[in-house]
Amino acid sequence: MFLKRLERRKNGKGHTYWALVESIRRAGGSRHRVVAYLGELKKSEQAGWATLCRRLNQEDRPAPSLFDSPRYDEPDDANEPVLVKLKDIRLERLRDFGDVWLVLGLWRLLKLDVLLSERMEAGAEGVPWPTVAAILTMARFCEPSSELHIADTWYRRTALEDLLGVGVEQVHHRRLYEGLDALLPHKEAIERHLKERLGDLFDLKYDLLLYDITSTYFEGQCEGNPMAQRGYSRDSRPDCPQVCIGLVVTEGGIPLGYEVFDGNTSDSTTIETIVKAMEAKYGQADRVWMLDRGMVSEKNLAFLCQRGGSYIVGTPKAMLKQFEQHLTQKDWHEVQAGVEVKLVPGPEGHETFILARSADRREKEKAMHDRFVERFEAGLTKLQQVAEKGVLRDAPIAHQRLGRLKERYWRASGAFEVKVTPIDPPVGKARLSITWTRNERWKEWSAISEGCYLLRTNLTETDPAVLWKRYIQLTEAEWAFRITKDELAIRPIWHHKEDRVKAHILVCFLAYVLWKTLAQWMKASGLGDAPRAVIEEIAKIKSGDVALRARRADGRDHAIRVRCVTTPDKPQKVLLNRLGLTLPQRLRYFDEVAQM
């Protein structure tokens, strides 16, 4: 394995890229295979990234390479013995290093720097747009915040000035906003590139696609953005305008692409758009789509069938009533502890329905029903008391209040049969009688259906366990949204311009791709697949300047400053070793004749 230099000229300017290459023997002779493109590397960078691809393939760590040697500019006499004044030794300019160094490596591992350098035209800007895109994405990954916070606080607190060669004074909020504008036109090219690159790294399969949709809301009215509309809010903010985001991931949760929809878009109307978008990017092929029940309609299922696709989808809870007799039968198959499934042929013969019931889900739904019944009955009791006092006298108003009760406690709306009867002649102050009785049929059906749900598919697979386990993978898409909202803080959106909003979502998408890349890398290294703990531990590694005054052999005093990286402690060394990474020891070296 060796390091290969790649020269390229763009707009009259020469660029040097590096790739890690290995020699392999084939029938036609020896060939070179690129293990990883490393982009433009500065002398101040050390690595360990050369080991990354081999780690992902669970191979042994290679012997030390050129990346393991110091990469900073050090004078020839740096090893000369000097006299140091101990009282003048100081530690200055402590900066965050570990997390940004790790994420920059992920960015280069995915070759996003190479892709954007080829596609984003260079102009008169002081900082190349690919570098601005990297800064925006790394900030979203490490410390999600506004562009103003990145420029004023976050960037100057990190070691990116040394890693990227971009000065603190060059990073300001206007440049970051302009970077968003420059990045957005390359969304489709980025998605295609990531699909290929992630497929090479993790040997992904694309025959099973999971699709789900969420929303994210705005702060402000966003009157200039036609996409910002009020609709069903998954963030419990119906008072705010929002946009909807549809995300497609593989069965392992690796993102393939996304689309942004108006905030008042119904879930079921997004299917055609997202399927056509995926086919335009990756071709039309036999794929299995996993869809939540909110997207299911006969029109959508017919659309998938017409395009040669297959599906496993959820169904509305009300559809369970058609299979009541199957719920009471005993021919269930246990697929895991506490979960049982069975197959039921569809009435038209081209579909199969999968009945599933979960013991944990049954306990949860039973507790919810009991709580709603209790609160609904307490509301009826209060309504009755108000009627007995003569405060509630009008039957239409009583029915309105009853309707509000049913809306609020909708899970128990059928638990009682309620009668509102005028009293003529009145009894004391009472003009209305409100009575109720338990609905035994509702109680019986609840006992049967609690913990049960229904799936439907047009696959010919006859093993109910296989079909159920495939559908359960839809939770990967739900986790994608949870990570994007909680860890990467996609909400709320403070941008108001439509394109800026889309660019903000694109940056969040890229940060999520880096997150899943690290998760897969950790999984291959036997570290689980939850990056947060690893990020927090590696983020404790800092860089700082060791400043001292020394006297060299020439008799003159020198002000020496060495920009070093803190030595990792034992847990950090274990993590770095498992990931196959080698930290740099020094970043920069300064030596000036001290002024007397």
Image (spheres, rainbow, N blue to C red):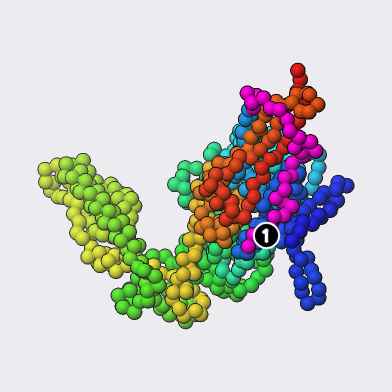
Q: In the figure, residue 27 lies in which quadrant?
A: bottom right
What residue is at 63 percent from the left and 62 percent from the top? 60
Direction left: furthest residue: 428
Find residue 360 and report its horizontal and vertical position in percent. 34, 62
Q: Nearer the viewer, residue 327 or 469?
A: 469
Q: Does the segment drawn in magenta span residue 67?
A: yes
What residue is at 46 percent from the left and 44 percent from the top? 237
What residue is at 76 percent from the left and 72 percent from the top? 25
Q: Nearer the viewer, residue 341 or 326?
A: 341
Q: Can residue 212 be seen in this view?
A: no
As drawn, is 143 to the left or to the right of 115? Answer: left
Position above or below: 57 against 70: below
Find residue 252 and report its horizontal and vertical position in percent. 55, 63
Q: Does the segment drawn in magenta span residue 358?
A: no
Q: What stretch is highlighted in magenta?
A: 60-89
Q: What residue type is labelled 1?
A: Pro
